[in-house]
Amino acid sequence: MQHGKSEDGTPATTNAAAHDGDTSIPPRPEDERLPAKLLGLYGLQHILTMYAGAVAPALVIGGAAGLSPADQGILVSGALLVAGIATLLQTLGPWRTGAQLPIVVAASFVPVGAMTTIATDQGLPVVFGASLVGGLFALCLTPFFGQLVRFFPPAVTGSIITVIGLSLMPVAAGWIVNNNPSGHPSLSDIGLGAATLALVLLFSRVLPGLLGRVAVLLGLVAGTLIALPLGKTDFSAVSDGAFFALGSPLHFGMPEFELAAILTMCVIMLVVLTEGASHIIAVAEITGSKVDAKRISAGLRADVSASIIGPIFNTTPGSSFAQNIGLLALTKIKSRFVVASGAGILIVLGLFPVLGRAVAAIPMPVLGGAGLVLFGTVAASGIRTLGKVDFDNNLNLILVATSLGFGILPMAVPDFYEGFPGPIATVLHSGIVGAAIVAIVLNICFNVIGRGKSPAPSAEIDRDELKTAGPGEAKYTEAADAAYRSGSDDGRRPSGGGEADGKHPSGRGEAGGNAGADGGEPAGEEGELSAKSD
């Protein structure tokens, strides 16, 4: 494999999608191949970004169940091991499982509240039983959720991505607060978070090429070094506990199945699926990748795999991690193999708890300072997507405004939906899901219902363009190719709408601005185009 230099000085690489000498098919941005040393470095940056969030659900649920520190360590190791397996499935996409996108899958925050209650009242085996059944239930629904892609135009995706970024800001703030009993951060924690933030910004601004791309990683390391003399971090606990462990399958016993817990988890999995579909579309938007219904369904199956495998290794349902979406937007590193290498690191951390304890020594305020940049970048990516929306039609403005309002509402007033029935409150409590539901429903009401039948795909596409379509354009190219062929018998092709008679859908046969699609010229009032001979 040949490597050159890109404009920013980092190694330029060839792409996996352009193998076998087939240069007519453009490489997908997520298939970029990087040298092994860069894969490891960039992958480590992803893991450091999401580590605290990945283990937090295990620590919260373990504390609610009254577990000893050693048993809590088993929950943490299981969470990391399952996260690594699910992330490998998501990035590599074997057996129609995984979107083949740079997405990290780990323990979800969505079910933590419900699982804490179940663990306190009924124990961890009931938690794991409900997770297993909920995962199987969600697996059956993944084909349906994959069809939602057609209801996600830029007005919808931009609103959802913006809410994802905004909803993560309280997470970063919570890390800076660092469990202070007063509910607000100490001045030293604020200073540590601010120093980390300043270092990330400085490194992003002054470091060239490769070093600039790992600014977040460098900021985390530098922030941890600053914390050492301040007594804000302690590596002495790294040597405590087991050095190596195989995940301790079914350590807490066989899963138990209680109807109420199962029903609750099935409702929660609907939320997880909706968030997962939103995250896949967000990553595709940031990386410039193409997604269709099949790809979203495959990605959701990878998310759900964490809920099915998780109970075996003593962990809870998983979902794609929004934290890492910010890192993608910030670094512009789109290769799925980078995240796959990070998945390998997660598996190693799960098998070697001593390594996990070392990473866990990074102070929470340091993570919070870096998180402000990462999570803000997610929101900025959503705003950039909204820039593509045509707001001349006031209905799109109302759609975006209402969905953002529903997304921010539970962040502004966390107890707003407490008076609703349990399952409804669980769904609405997620601002991301609320924004997604409102945006999709309003898009159907405003832009789908009553708009009439959409015109057939335009045939104004060159044969060479048909060969270079991405995976998300398969249906479009099939329709366009059929329209192209329908008018090719006499060396002419229709001017629009894919009509076999070569007439414009309006009945006027206008060629308009389509005349130059393949170098042809207007052929007269009937709007026929003279085509180049092949």
Image: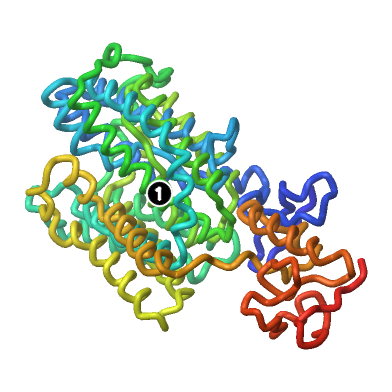
- Identified at 66% across, 51% down, the residue is 32
Q: Nearer the viewer, residue 151 or 31?
A: 151
Q: Element at badge 1?
A: helix
What amino acid type is highlighted by mark number 1?
Thr
Extreme residue toward the bottom, this view = 525
Instruction: Give the percent coordinates (x, y) of residue 310.
Output: 37, 26
Image check: 193 left or right of 443?
Answer: left
Q: Which residue is mark 1?
A: 49
Q: Nearer the viewer, residue 268 or 198?
A: 268
Image check: 335 left or right of 513?
Answer: left
Instruction: Give the percent coordinates (x, y) of residue 152.
Output: 45, 59
| Relative height, residue 458 to residue 234 (above, below) | below
Number of numbered discs overlaid on the protein picture:
1
**Within 10 angstroms of label 1, few (less than 14), some, or many (20 or more) residues?**
many
Quadrant of the drawing holding the C terminus: bottom right
Can residue 377 be seen in this snapshot?
A: no
Q: Nearer the viewer, residue 300 or 190?
A: 300
Image check: 396 left or right of 167?
Answer: right
- Identified at 40% across, 61% down, the residue is 378
Can residue 277 be seen in this snapshot?
A: yes
- Identified at 42% across, 34% down, the residue is 83
Q: Which colour assignment does the render follow?
A: rainbow
Instruction: Give the percent coordinates (x, y) of residue 296.
Output: 50, 46
